[in-house]
Image: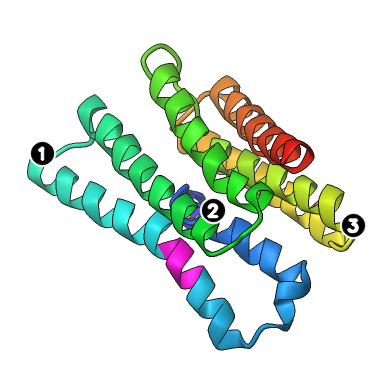
C-alpha cells in the first residue's frame, strides 16, 4: 500500500511533468489567467510537448532498446531533455515571453548539466531537484508579481515537497542527503536565474 502510494507520488511529480506545473502556476497567478481555456491549453500543451512528451518517449525507446536504465541511458536522457528545453526556450523567446519567465526553462538546462556532473560522484534526487526548481519558481512569481498566491497554497506546495522527498526516501531511490541536496540546488538555480534575468534584463 505505502509502496504503491510512494510510486504514484513519484510519478505524479515526475521531473518530466514539473516544468508544466511551473508554467501552469505562472499562468493562473498572472493576467494570463483571463485567456480562454483553449489558449491556455495550447500554451501548456507546447510546454508539455517539449519538457515531458518528447523526452519521455525518446528515453523510453532508448531503455527498451538497451534493456536497462544504466549510466549511459541517464546521460542520454539529460542530453535529449536539454535539447528539448533549448527548443522550448527559443520558442518562448520568439513568442515575446519575458526573459525572466523563460529563465525557468534556462534554469532547467543548467540543472541538467549540474545533475549530469554530480551523478558521477553523488546520487542527487532528480525528482527533488525538479521540485526545488518549482519552489524557486513559486517564490520568483511572488517576488515579481506580488503576493498573489494564497499562503494556504504555498503551505500546501511545501507539504507536497515533503511528501515527495519522503516517497523517494521510502523507495530507497536516494539518501536523505541526495534528496535535500536536490531540493536546495533546484531552488537556488531556479530562483536566482529568474532574479538576475529580471534585474539585469
On the picture, is 64 further left or further right than 88?
left
Mark 3 and mark 2: Cα distance apart in space: 22 Å
For label 2, the SS is helix
Q: Where does label 1 land, which residue?
A: 66
Would you say residue 19 sits in the magenta stretch?
A: no
- Residue 45 part of the magenta segment: yes
Look at 52% across and 23% down and name the residue there: 175
Residue 146 is marked as: 3
Q: Residue at x 69, y 62 (%)?
A: 26
Q: Earlier in the sequence, mark 1 or mark 2?
A: 2
Relative horizontal placement of residue 121, taking residue 25 as reference (left or right): left
Image mark for residue 144: none
| Most common SS among magenta residues | helix
Task: Read off the residue under disc 2.
Answer: 18
Q: Residues within 10 Å of mark 2 (few under 14, many from 20)?
A: many
Q: From this viewpoint, is residue 7 visible?
A: no
User: Label 3 crowding class (10 Å Cα cut-off): few <14, some 14-19, many 20+?
Assistant: few
What residue span does the magenta drawing correspond to? Answer: 44-48
Q: Quadrant of the C terminus?
A: top right
Few, some or many residues within 10 Å of mark 1 (<14, 14–19, 20+):
few
User: How far across and how far down the image is residue 70, in percent?
Assistant: 22, 29
**Of the two numbered discs 1 and 2 in the rendering, the one whose residue sits closer to the viewer:** 2
User: Furthest residue to the top?
Assistant: 121
> In percent of the image, x 44 and y 67: which residue is there?
46
Label 1 close to label 2 by CB (< 8 Å): no
Q: How is the image coloured?
A: rainbow
Which x, y percent locates residue 176?
59, 25
Image quadrant where residue 37 sits: bottom right
Residue 160 in the figure: left or right of residue 19: right
Amino acid at each position: 500500500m505505502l509502496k504503491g502510494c510512494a510510486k504514484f507520488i513519484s510519478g505524479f511529480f515526475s521531473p518530466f511533468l514539473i516544468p508544466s506545473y511551473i508554467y501552469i502556476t505562472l499562468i493562473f497567478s498572472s493576467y494570463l489567467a483571463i485567456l480562454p481555456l483553449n489558449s491556455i491549453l495550447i500554451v501548456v500543451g507546447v510546454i508539455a510537448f517539449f519538457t515531458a512528451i518528447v523526452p519521455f518517449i525518446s528515453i523510453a525507446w532508448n531503455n527498451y532498446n538497451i534493456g536497462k536504465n544504466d549510466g549511459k541511458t541517464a546521460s542520454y536522457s539529460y542530453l535529449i531533455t536539454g535539447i528539448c528545453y533549448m527548443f522550448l526556450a527559443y520558442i518562448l523567446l520568439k513568442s515575446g515571453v519575458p526573459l525572466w519567465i523563460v529563465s525557468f526553462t534556462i534554469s532547467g538546462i543548467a540543472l541538467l548539466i549540474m545533475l549530469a556532473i554530480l551523478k558521477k560522484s553523488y546520487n542527487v534526487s532528480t525528482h527533488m531537484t525538479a521540485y526545488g526548481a518549482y519552489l524557486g519558481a513559486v517564490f520568483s512569481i511572488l517576488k515579481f508579481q506580488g503576493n498573489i498566491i494564497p499562503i494556504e497554497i504555498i503551505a500546501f506546495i511545501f507539504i507536497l515537497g515533503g511528501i515527495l522527498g519522503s516517497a523517494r526516501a521510502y523507495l530507497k531511490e536516494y539518501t536523505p542527503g541526495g534528496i535535500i541536496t536536490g531540493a536546495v540546488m533546484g531552488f537556488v538555480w531556479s530562483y536566482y536565474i529568474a532574479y538576475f534575468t529580471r534585474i539585469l534584463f
